[in-house]
Image (cartoon, helix red, strand yellow):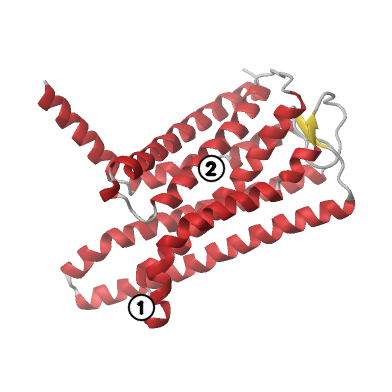
Protein backbone atom coordinates (compact mmCIF):
# COMPACT_ATOMS: atom_id res chain seq x y z
CA UNK A 1 0.00 0.00 0.00
CA UNK A 2 1.42 3.38 -1.01
CA UNK A 3 1.86 6.25 1.39
CA UNK A 4 -0.72 8.36 -0.47
CA UNK A 5 -3.32 5.60 -0.19
CA UNK A 6 -2.62 5.26 3.53
CA UNK A 7 -3.14 9.00 3.92
CA UNK A 8 -6.39 8.68 1.98
CA UNK A 9 -7.72 5.97 4.30
CA UNK A 10 -6.73 7.98 7.36
CA UNK A 11 -8.38 11.13 5.99
CA UNK A 12 -11.52 9.16 5.10
CA UNK A 13 -11.82 7.81 8.67
CA UNK A 14 -11.22 11.27 10.11
CA UNK A 15 -13.67 12.99 7.76
CA UNK A 16 -16.37 10.36 8.24
CA UNK A 17 -16.09 10.40 12.03
CA UNK A 18 -16.08 14.18 12.30
CA UNK A 19 -18.90 14.69 9.79
CA UNK A 20 -21.09 12.11 11.53
CA UNK A 21 -20.46 13.63 14.98
CA UNK A 22 -21.13 17.20 13.86
CA UNK A 23 -24.23 16.16 11.91
CA UNK A 24 -25.59 14.32 14.97
CA UNK A 25 -25.12 17.33 17.22
CA UNK A 26 -26.53 19.73 14.63
CA UNK A 27 -29.62 17.51 14.29
CA UNK A 28 -29.94 17.50 18.09
CA UNK A 29 -29.80 21.30 18.31
CA UNK A 30 -32.34 21.67 15.48
CA UNK A 31 -34.64 19.08 17.08
CA UNK A 32 -34.39 20.87 20.41
CA UNK A 33 -35.03 24.26 18.80
CA UNK A 34 -38.14 23.21 16.87
CA UNK A 35 -39.62 20.41 19.04
CA UNK A 36 -38.23 20.75 22.56
CA UNK A 37 -38.06 24.49 23.10
CA UNK A 38 -38.39 24.06 26.88
CA UNK A 39 -35.05 22.20 26.89
CA UNK A 40 -33.26 24.77 24.76
CA UNK A 41 -30.07 26.23 26.23
CA UNK A 42 -28.75 29.75 25.51
CA UNK A 43 -25.55 28.37 23.96
CA UNK A 44 -27.38 26.03 21.55
CA UNK A 45 -27.45 28.70 18.85
CA UNK A 46 -23.67 29.09 18.98
CA UNK A 47 -23.06 25.34 18.95
CA UNK A 48 -25.50 24.80 16.08
CA UNK A 49 -23.50 27.20 13.90
CA UNK A 50 -20.23 25.68 15.10
CA UNK A 51 -21.25 22.11 14.22
CA UNK A 52 -22.64 23.25 10.86
CA UNK A 53 -19.39 25.05 10.02
CA UNK A 54 -17.34 22.03 11.15
CA UNK A 55 -19.40 19.62 9.04
CA UNK A 56 -19.06 21.80 5.92
CA UNK A 57 -15.33 22.25 6.54
CA UNK A 58 -14.78 18.50 6.75
CA UNK A 59 -16.90 17.86 3.68
CA UNK A 60 -15.35 20.45 1.40
CA UNK A 61 -11.79 20.05 2.66
CA UNK A 62 -11.67 16.34 3.39
CA UNK A 63 -13.37 14.90 0.30
CA UNK A 64 -11.07 16.62 -2.29
CA UNK A 65 -8.00 15.53 -0.28
CA UNK A 66 -9.29 11.94 -0.10
CA UNK A 67 -9.96 11.86 -3.84
CA UNK A 68 -6.51 13.26 -4.59
CA UNK A 69 -4.72 10.81 -2.28
CA UNK A 70 -6.24 7.86 -4.15
CA UNK A 71 -4.84 9.18 -7.43
CA UNK A 72 -8.15 10.36 -8.91
CA UNK A 73 -8.18 13.76 -10.60
CA UNK A 74 -11.71 14.64 -11.68
CA UNK A 75 -12.18 17.84 -13.63
CA UNK A 76 -14.43 19.91 -11.38
CA UNK A 77 -13.90 23.04 -13.46
CA UNK A 78 -13.47 26.65 -12.43
CA UNK A 79 -16.94 26.86 -10.85
CA UNK A 80 -16.36 23.78 -8.71
CA UNK A 81 -13.02 25.12 -7.51
CA UNK A 82 -14.54 28.48 -6.63
CA UNK A 83 -17.34 26.84 -4.62
CA UNK A 84 -15.06 24.39 -2.78
CA UNK A 85 -12.38 26.88 -1.80
CA UNK A 86 -14.89 29.63 -0.95
CA UNK A 87 -16.85 27.38 1.42
CA UNK A 88 -13.60 26.12 2.99
CA UNK A 89 -12.50 29.64 3.85
CA UNK A 90 -15.89 30.94 5.01
CA UNK A 91 -16.59 27.97 7.28
CA UNK A 92 -13.07 28.17 8.75
CA UNK A 93 -13.78 31.80 9.65
CA UNK A 94 -17.16 30.86 11.18
CA UNK A 95 -15.52 28.10 13.22
CA UNK A 96 -13.01 30.60 14.59
CA UNK A 97 -15.69 33.14 15.43
CA UNK A 98 -18.16 30.73 17.05
CA UNK A 99 -15.43 29.16 19.21
CA UNK A 100 -14.40 32.64 20.32
CA UNK A 101 -18.03 33.61 20.93
CA UNK A 102 -18.67 30.43 22.92
CA UNK A 103 -15.68 31.06 25.19
CA UNK A 104 -16.75 34.68 25.68
CA UNK A 105 -20.34 33.67 26.41
CA UNK A 106 -19.18 31.14 29.01
CA UNK A 107 -16.85 33.68 30.60
CA UNK A 108 -19.70 36.18 30.90
CA UNK A 109 -22.16 33.70 32.38
CA UNK A 110 -19.85 31.81 34.74
CA UNK A 111 -19.16 34.38 37.43
CA UNK A 112 -19.76 38.01 36.55
CA UNK A 113 -21.17 40.02 39.41
CA UNK A 114 -21.76 43.68 40.03
CA UNK A 115 -24.10 46.26 38.47
CA UNK A 116 -21.70 47.34 35.72
CA UNK A 117 -21.75 43.83 34.16
CA UNK A 118 -25.42 43.06 34.81
CA UNK A 119 -26.61 44.48 31.47
CA UNK A 120 -24.15 42.30 29.54
CA UNK A 121 -25.10 39.15 31.40
CA UNK A 122 -28.81 39.84 30.92
CA UNK A 123 -28.60 40.73 27.22
CA UNK A 124 -25.87 38.49 25.86
CA UNK A 125 -28.32 35.74 24.88
CA UNK A 126 -30.25 38.14 22.64
CA UNK A 127 -27.04 39.30 20.95
CA UNK A 128 -25.84 35.82 19.94
CA UNK A 129 -27.88 35.22 16.78
CA UNK A 130 -27.44 38.75 15.29
CA UNK A 131 -23.69 38.61 15.89
CA UNK A 132 -23.35 35.18 14.26
CA UNK A 133 -25.44 36.31 11.28
CA UNK A 134 -23.22 39.40 10.96
CA UNK A 135 -20.13 37.18 11.05
CA UNK A 136 -21.51 35.04 8.21
CA UNK A 137 -22.09 38.17 6.13
CA UNK A 138 -18.65 39.65 6.87
CA UNK A 139 -16.86 36.36 6.15
CA UNK A 140 -18.73 35.89 2.88
CA UNK A 141 -17.81 39.42 1.81
CA UNK A 142 -14.15 39.13 2.81
CA UNK A 143 -13.61 35.84 0.98
CA UNK A 144 -15.59 36.87 -2.10
CA UNK A 145 -12.22 37.76 -3.62
CA UNK A 146 -11.54 34.01 -3.83
CA UNK A 147 -14.46 33.61 -6.24
CA UNK A 148 -12.79 35.99 -8.67
CA UNK A 149 -9.27 34.56 -8.41
CA UNK A 150 -9.74 30.78 -8.11
CA UNK A 151 -9.43 28.64 -11.25
CA UNK A 152 -9.11 24.95 -11.96
CA UNK A 153 -5.57 23.56 -11.97
CA UNK A 154 -5.19 21.88 -15.35
CA UNK A 155 -1.40 21.64 -15.29
CA UNK A 156 0.04 20.08 -12.12
CA UNK A 157 3.60 21.00 -13.15
CA UNK A 158 2.77 24.69 -13.32
CA UNK A 159 3.27 25.54 -9.65
CA UNK A 160 2.66 29.20 -8.94
CA UNK A 161 2.85 31.22 -5.79
CA UNK A 162 -0.17 31.44 -3.56
CA UNK A 163 -2.76 28.78 -2.92
CA UNK A 164 -2.23 25.62 -4.95
CA UNK A 165 -3.75 22.14 -4.82
CA UNK A 166 -4.08 19.17 -7.18
CA UNK A 167 -7.46 20.55 -8.33
CA UNK A 168 -7.42 24.32 -7.88
CA UNK A 169 -5.13 27.29 -7.71
CA UNK A 170 -5.46 31.01 -7.10
CA UNK A 171 -4.38 33.23 -9.94
CA UNK A 172 -1.90 36.00 -9.24
CA UNK A 173 -3.19 38.82 -7.08
CA UNK A 174 -2.53 42.48 -7.59
CA UNK A 175 -0.01 43.40 -4.91
CA UNK A 176 -2.20 46.03 -3.28
CA UNK A 177 -5.25 43.76 -3.32
CA UNK A 178 -3.24 40.89 -1.84
CA UNK A 179 -1.90 43.05 0.99
CA UNK A 180 -5.38 44.37 1.78
CA UNK A 181 -6.92 40.90 1.72
CA UNK A 182 -4.24 39.26 3.87
CA UNK A 183 -4.23 42.17 6.33
CA UNK A 184 -8.00 41.94 6.74
CA UNK A 185 -7.87 38.20 7.37
CA UNK A 186 -4.94 38.57 9.77
CA UNK A 187 -6.63 41.33 11.78
CA UNK A 188 -9.83 39.28 12.00
CA UNK A 189 -8.00 36.15 13.15
CA UNK A 190 -5.84 37.98 15.70
CA UNK A 191 -8.90 39.77 17.11
CA UNK A 192 -10.88 36.56 17.63
CA UNK A 193 -7.89 34.61 18.94
CA UNK A 194 -7.12 37.39 21.42
CA UNK A 195 -10.74 37.43 22.57
CA UNK A 196 -10.59 33.65 22.94
CA UNK A 197 -7.37 33.81 24.95
CA UNK A 198 -8.61 36.59 27.27
CA UNK A 199 -11.88 34.83 28.03
CA UNK A 200 -10.01 31.57 28.65
CA UNK A 201 -7.61 33.24 31.11
CA UNK A 202 -10.59 34.76 32.90
CA UNK A 203 -12.37 31.39 33.14
CA UNK A 204 -9.24 29.72 34.50
CA UNK A 205 -8.96 32.49 37.10
CA UNK A 206 -12.61 32.03 38.13
CA UNK A 207 -12.24 28.25 38.38
CA UNK A 208 -9.09 28.58 40.48
CA UNK A 209 -10.77 31.05 42.82
CA UNK A 210 -13.82 28.83 43.17
CA UNK A 211 -11.64 25.80 43.89
CA UNK A 212 -9.88 27.64 46.72
CA UNK A 213 -13.19 28.82 48.19
CA UNK A 214 -14.73 25.35 47.90
CA UNK A 215 -11.83 23.81 49.79
CA UNK A 216 -12.26 26.31 52.60
CA UNK A 217 -16.03 26.16 52.83
CA UNK A 218 -16.34 22.39 52.30
CA UNK A 219 -19.93 22.81 51.20
CA UNK A 220 -21.34 19.89 49.22
CA UNK A 221 -24.41 21.93 48.30
CA UNK A 222 -22.33 24.70 46.80
CA UNK A 223 -20.22 22.22 44.87
CA UNK A 224 -23.19 20.36 43.44
CA UNK A 225 -24.85 23.55 42.27
CA UNK A 226 -21.78 24.85 40.50
CA UNK A 227 -20.58 21.58 39.00
CA UNK A 228 -22.65 21.64 35.75
CA UNK A 229 -21.55 25.19 34.99
CA UNK A 230 -17.92 24.40 35.76
CA UNK A 231 -18.09 21.21 33.70
CA UNK A 232 -19.27 23.26 30.73
CA UNK A 233 -16.43 25.70 31.37
CA UNK A 234 -13.87 22.87 31.30
CA UNK A 235 -15.32 21.69 27.98
CA UNK A 236 -15.03 25.17 26.47
CA UNK A 237 -11.46 25.53 27.72
CA UNK A 238 -10.58 22.20 26.14
CA UNK A 239 -12.09 23.31 22.83
CA UNK A 240 -10.21 26.60 22.94
CA UNK A 241 -6.88 24.88 23.64
CA UNK A 242 -7.48 22.43 20.78
CA UNK A 243 -8.47 25.20 18.39
CA UNK A 244 -5.44 27.39 19.17
CA UNK A 245 -3.02 24.47 18.90
CA UNK A 246 -4.33 23.20 15.58
CA UNK A 247 -4.78 26.75 14.23
CA UNK A 248 -1.14 27.71 14.76
CA UNK A 249 0.12 24.32 13.58
CA UNK A 250 -1.92 24.61 10.40
CA UNK A 251 -0.82 28.23 9.89
CA UNK A 252 2.86 27.30 10.27
CA UNK A 253 2.61 24.39 7.84
CA UNK A 254 0.65 26.51 5.36
CA UNK A 255 3.24 29.31 5.46
CA UNK A 256 6.07 26.79 5.11
CA UNK A 257 4.48 25.13 2.09
CA UNK A 258 3.53 28.43 0.41
CA UNK A 259 7.02 29.91 0.64
CA UNK A 260 8.85 26.68 -0.20
CA UNK A 261 10.55 26.30 -3.54
CA UNK A 262 8.92 22.95 -4.29
CA UNK A 263 5.52 21.54 -3.48
CA UNK A 264 5.53 18.61 -1.09
CA UNK A 265 2.19 16.86 -1.54
CA UNK A 266 2.74 14.62 1.47
CA UNK A 267 3.15 17.77 3.58
CA UNK A 268 -0.10 19.03 2.04
CA UNK A 269 -1.87 15.85 3.13
CA UNK A 270 -0.48 16.22 6.66
CA UNK A 271 -1.60 19.84 6.73
CA UNK A 272 -5.09 18.87 5.56
CA UNK A 273 -5.23 16.27 8.30
CA UNK A 274 -4.12 18.83 10.91
CA UNK A 275 -6.63 21.41 9.71
CA UNK A 276 -9.44 18.84 10.01
CA UNK A 277 -8.49 17.71 13.52
CA UNK A 278 -10.41 20.43 15.36
CA UNK A 279 -13.69 19.90 13.41
CA UNK A 280 -13.34 16.18 14.16
CA UNK A 281 -12.47 16.48 17.87
CA UNK A 282 -14.98 19.26 18.58
CA UNK A 283 -18.19 17.13 18.50
CA UNK A 284 -16.54 14.37 20.54
CA UNK A 285 -15.67 16.90 23.26
CA UNK A 286 -19.14 18.48 23.16
CA UNK A 287 -20.84 15.09 23.49
CA UNK A 288 -19.15 14.57 26.86
CA UNK A 289 -21.18 17.50 28.20
CA UNK A 290 -24.38 16.80 26.23
CA UNK A 291 -26.70 14.68 28.36
CA UNK A 292 -29.66 15.30 26.05
CA UNK A 293 -28.34 12.62 23.66
CA UNK A 294 -28.58 9.92 26.31
CA UNK A 295 -31.97 11.26 27.37
CA UNK A 296 -33.28 11.06 23.81
CA UNK A 297 -32.05 7.47 23.50
CA UNK A 298 -33.71 6.65 26.82
CA UNK A 299 -37.01 8.21 25.72
CA UNK A 300 -36.92 6.38 22.39
CA UNK A 301 -36.23 3.04 24.09
CA UNK A 302 -39.07 3.62 26.57
CA UNK A 303 -41.38 4.53 23.70
CA UNK A 304 -40.57 1.30 21.85
CA UNK A 305 -41.24 -0.75 25.00
CA UNK A 306 -44.54 1.01 25.55
CA UNK A 307 -45.64 0.50 21.95
CA UNK A 308 -44.75 -3.17 21.93
Q: Where does residue 116 sit, x and y in percent of width and height?
A: 42, 81
Residue placed at 16% from the left, 29% from the top?
303
Q: Is residue 95 left or right of residue 43?
A: right
Determine the residue positioned at 50% across, 28% down.
13
Dot label at residue 303: none
- Dot 2 lies on which element? helix
Taking depth in this image into account, of 234 and 215 the one nearest to the observer is 234
Write the residue at 39% across / 50% down.
44
Give whichever of 244, 54 is nearer the camera: 54
* Side (left or right) of 48 relative to 256: left
- Give percent across and percent down for residue 247: 61, 51
Give the class, few, some or many, for how many residues have Cα within 10 Å of label 2's Cα (few <14, many ≥20): many
280 left or right of 63 in image: left
Residue receiving disc 2: 53
Q: Say which quadrant the C terminus sits in.
A: top left
Give the quarter of the image for residue 191.
bottom right
Mark 2 or 1, nearer chain start: 2
**Residue drawn 74% across the image and 19% down it:** 75
Residue beneath label 1, please?
113
53 versus 98 height, above or below: above
**Cα gap from disc 2 to disc 1, whole angstroms:** 33 Å
Residue 208 appears in the picture as rendered? yes
Quarter of the figure that contains the N terminus: top right
Q: Position of residue 204 (x, y in %)?
A: 42, 68
How many residues crowd mark 1 within 10 Å: few (<14), some (14–19), many (20+)? few
Viewer-side residue, 183 vs 218? 183
Q: Circle 1 sits in a helix, a strand or a loop, which is it?
A: loop
In-image side of 195 versus 163 (left or right): left
The percent coordinates of residue 174 (x first, y second) are 89, 48
Amino acid sequence: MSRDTLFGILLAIQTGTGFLGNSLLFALYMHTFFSLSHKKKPADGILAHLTLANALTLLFRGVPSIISSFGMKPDIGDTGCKVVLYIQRVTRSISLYTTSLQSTFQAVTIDISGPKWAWLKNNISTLIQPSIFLCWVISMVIYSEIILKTVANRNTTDVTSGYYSPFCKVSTYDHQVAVTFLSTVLIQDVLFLSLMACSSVYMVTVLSRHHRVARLVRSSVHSSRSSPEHTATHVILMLVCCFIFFYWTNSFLTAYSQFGHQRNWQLEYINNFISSCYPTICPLVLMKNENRISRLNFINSRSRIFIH
